[in-house]
Amino acid sequence: MGILCTLLGHKPPKSVSKHAAMGGGDYLVPAQPHRDNLGRVHLHVYGDCPRCGERYQVGMMHLHSAMDFAHLHGDGSDE
């Protein structure tokens, strides 16, 4: 880890910064999802720091939330 990342934290990958839709960005890497005792599926998402190159955890999500959203809003295809 570089000195700037030690002092300021990792710089977010382009795909999670403000202007990700403008000009693409880096892909994030999901880890293996796991299910807790309540039946929720947890997913950790990782990205590479553009400043030091180290892979770090960018975020977490409940996988059923994403599937519920896709079900409610469709998959983007016209039926």
Image (cartoon, rainbow, N blue to C red):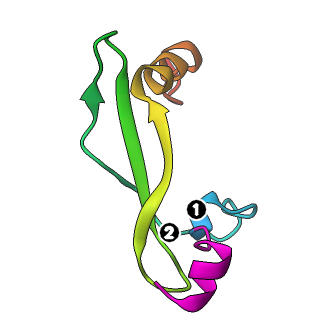
Q: Is residue 69 above or below residue 32?
A: above
Count of labels shown?
Answer: 2
User: In front: 12, or 70?
Assistant: 12
Residue under label 2, please give it.
26
Q: Which residue is mark 1?
A: 15
**Magenta region: which residues?**
1-12
Q: Is residue 6 above or below residue 47?
A: below
Type of residue at label 2?
Asp
Q: Secondary structure at mark 2?
A: loop
Residue 31 shown in magenta = no
Name the residue rendered at 49%, 16% in the picture.
68
Residue lying at 68% horizontally and 76% vertically, measured from the top left: 8
Horizontal placement of 16 versus 30: left or right?
Answer: right
User: Disc 1 and disc 2: Cα gap in Å?
Assistant: 5 Å
- Residue 48: give its label: none
What residue is shown at x 58% (from left), y 19% (from top)? 73
Q: Measuring from the top left, give residue 15's x and y in whole percent.
A: 58, 62
Q: Determine whether, in the image, residue 40 is placed left or right of residue 34.
A: right
Most extreme residue toward the right is: 18
Q: Residues within 10 Å of mark 1 (few under 14, many from 20)?
A: some
Name the residue located 48 percent from the left edge and 34 percent from the top edge. Answer: 61
Q: What percent of the width, then of the height, locates residue 9? A: 62, 72
Q: Secondary structure at mark 1?
A: helix
Viewer-closest of 27 and 61: 61
Residue 56 picture location, percent across and down: 43, 64
Tell whether label 2 touches label 1 (CB within 8 Å).
yes
Please tell me how crowded label 2 is: few (under 14), some (14-19), or many (20+) other residues with Cα within 10 Å.
some
Looking at the image, the residue that sits furthest to the top is: 38
Q: Earlier in the sequence, mark 1 or mark 2?
A: 1
- In this rendering, the answer to whether 57 lies above or below 3 is above
Q: Is residue 28 visible?
A: no
Disc 1 marks a residue whose amino acid type is Ser
